[in-house]
Amino acid sequence: MRIENKDFWENESVIMTQDRTITSSSDYEVFLYLKALAFLKHKKETFKAKIFGCGTGREINELFKYLPIESAVATDISENMIKKCRENLINWKISQKTTTHVINATDYEKKEMNFDIVLLMNSILTYVDKKADRYKIFKNSFDILNPGGCVIGVVHNQTGSPQKTLYFMLRRISKPFLKNEVGNRTTGFKGFKVSGFYFSKKDLYKHLSDNGFQNIEIISLVEYYKEKNFKYNRLKGYNNLLFFATKNSK
């Protein structure tokens, strides 16, 4: 069944797949947290964080484990996700340090509130099918960062399993005839179909650089695990792209 993005994330069966009372981070998420910590720790002792697409809050709890977070603002498009998130934050005893709001990331323009780190995790940008909206999210992320701050995130990759890789290869060949972008693809789960977008490295770099970010680093899971001397099966895995970028100091 085809469904709109907000309705998808308001669905109880979808929320159940995201909700975790006991949280954990994948090793590549920890890699991003520690990379941000290494970059920021020479500037401040504690940091202010902004989390887009926070869902039920798993990454908020994990972020507090790995970085000295002074305060956090977490937002999501889904009212039901935020409701669950607030319950979890109380259980995790970090509710007093975390403010939550229901708002679309494209509409978050609170430039009077500045942060040291912005998170775009959980492949939230995969569910933003329009380029103008993705650019708005990256622009908002840049604008709310303090000079010397950073953004980290994960997105779905056009290169991965044979079926996915072939699909996007054919779309690149057919690009002059497409009515939408090469990266557009139907995604979703639990029987729902949602319009989405899968990135190439080139796409992701351009999204970041066009919106002011510098010192851009992008690595696929294949490359990440190769550096760890650990074999990663791209034929079965998502081969997500991990990214880190900064807002240079004035």
Image (cartoon, helix red, strand yellow):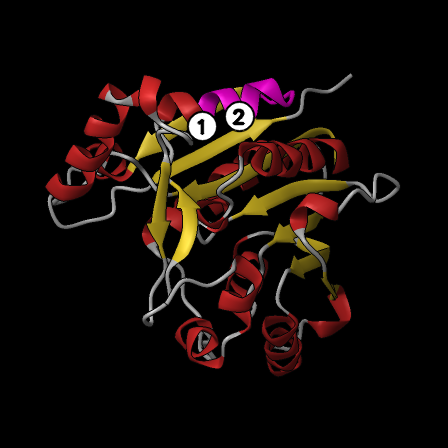
Spatial separation of the CA atoms under disc 2 and disc 1: 5 Å
Q: Position of residue 13 (x, y in %)?
A: 42, 79
The picture places residue 38, in percent across and down from the top left corner, at: 53, 36
Q: Nearer the viewer, residue 52 or 169?
A: 169
Dot 2: element: helix
Looking at the image, which residue is at 45% across and 28% down? Answer: 204
- What amino acid is at disc 1? Leu
Residue 213 falls within the magenta-colored stretch: yes
Q: Residue at x 45, y 54 (%)?
A: 122
Are discs 2 and 1 less than 8 Å apart at CB?
yes
> Does residue 193 appear to the left or right of 47 in the view shown?
left
Please determine whether, in this image, residue 4 is positioned above or below residue 140: below
Q: Mark 1 highlights which residue?
A: 204
Question: Could you say which disc has been placed on residue 10 in the image?
Answer: none
Magenta stretch: helix, strand or loop mostly: helix
Q: Is residue 244 above or below residue 122?
A: above
Residue 25: image location, x then y, percent? 40, 60
x 20%, y 36%: residue? 167
Spot the residue most to the right.
Answer: 112
Residue 40 or residue 233, whichever sits in front: 233
| Quarter of the image where one finds residue 239 | top left
Relative to the observer, which residue lies in front, 174 or 63?
174
Mark 1 nearby-residue class (10 Å; few <14, some 14–19, many ≥20): some
Q: Quadrant of the C terminus?
A: top right
- Residue at 49% across, 46% down: 33
Residue 106, located in which quarter of the rendered image? top right
Disc number placed over residue 207 in the picture, else none: 2
Residue 222 in percent (x, y) is at 21, 36
Q: Which residues are magenta?
A: 205-214
Classify residue 222 as left or right of residue 209: left
Q: Secondary structure under badge 1? A: helix
